[in-house]
Image (tube, rainbow, N blue to C red):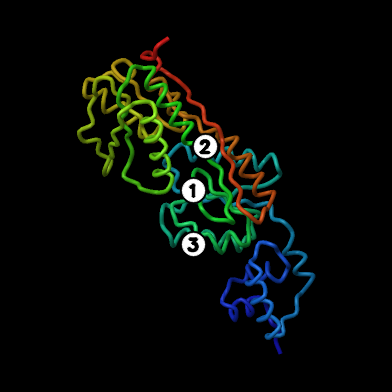
Amino acid sequence: MKPVRQADVAKAAGVSRGLVSLALSGSGRVAPETVERIQKVARELGYSRNFTAATLASARSTLVGVVLPNLRNPYFESLVSAYQNEADRRGLLTLAATAAGHLGRLERLLDQFDQLRVRGIILVTPDQDSQIYQSIAERYPVVAAGVPLTHELISTVHIDEFKAARLIAHHAVDTGCTQVVYVTNDQTDASTRYRLAAIEQETDAAGLQLEHYTIRDGRLGELTSREATCYLVQNDLMAIDVVAYLKASGARPGIDFPVMSYDNTYLAENPQFLLTSIDQEPAQQAQLSFDLIEANRQVGTERVVEPRLIVRASSRNLARP
């Protein structure tokens, strides 16, 4: 008779093989009722654990999986670089892949990370419901970067969006603005909503009028320069398009009105644009993310990073001394 394998127990219990392995090894990351159910099925099938194989399998991997929404935004490139540097410092290795908003692709990525028995997983601005990550978070430390997730097993690392919005609002007032036009794409994911809520609160507190302008299908449409108006753009990548568009219409960004954005990537430093931009401190976010993975806590923990506003020519010339 063939020996009963963990795969057989998993099939009979209706769970993944990885969850069976954790449950039978006494991992605290599995709910007690789930452990009890899996152990009951294992006993009924006559499963006997191979302790030599178990010892090899329980060795901690040096691989950390990173799931990105895309690679178009230079900010994600900055984050990946920060993760790689932090991994190098700890003798670990990162494996980054994109989900591009496709649920099926995300599920395949998580399954492949599971098969590789990664040390942990970092989800950059995840756009799926947190319950999607329930199964993987029971087996590995999972960190969500860029937005708080309401899930007891998932840790989060993100900037203080309200502090960032406050820095922007105060600088807009210093430049003499009475209105802020917030320019975004047409995405409605959790990170976009969270940032918008912060901007709404802090511009209102500063006595600024706020208009939300959405770019649809990559077209800027009727965006025009206005007196006493600050243009705040969702990220540096979009901001350079906004600046180029307004310049083409005869406006003078940084002279006639301020332009600000988020991410402080190499695009913001480009001499053609010199964007005032929020620095999200990717190196600090990476350090905190790896700290949480190494801690391997059974309950999700939140870490908040202080943002910085890097003021450049796109708004500096208009600011009051």
Image spot of residue 38 (x, y percent): 65, 76
N-terminal-most mark, 3 or 2: 3
Q: Residue at x 32, y 20 (%)?
A: 177
Residue type, numbered disc 2: Ile
Residue at figure coordinates x 63%, y 68% from the top left = 19
Residue situated in front as seen by the camera: 31 or 68: 31
The N terminus - image quarter: bottom right
Q: Is residue 5 left or right of residue 237?
A: right
Pair 1/2: label in front: 2
Number of numbered discs on residues:
3
Q: Which mark is residue 159?
A: 2
How far across and down, in percent of the image, does residue 59 sit?
74, 59
Quadrant of residue 85 in the image? top right
Question: Which label number is shown at residue 245?
Answer: none
How busy is the neighbourhood of tag 2: few (under 14 within 10 Å), some, or many (20 plus)?
A: many
Q: Residue furthest right?
A: 52
The label nearer to you, 3 versus 2, is 2
Q: Residue at x 58, y 45 (%)?
A: 302
Amino acid type for the residue under numbered disc 1: Leu
Q: Position of residue 178 (x, y in %)?
A: 30, 22
Q: Which mark is residue 107?
A: 3
Residue with the mark numbered 1: 68
Q: Give the residue type that dot 3 points to.
A: Glu
Q: Distance between the Cα atoms at labels 3 and 2?
A: 27 Å
Q: Earlier in the sequence, mark 1 or mark 3?
A: 1
SS for callout 3: helix
Residue 65, compared with residue 51, is above or below; it is above
Q: Secondary structure at mark 1?
A: strand
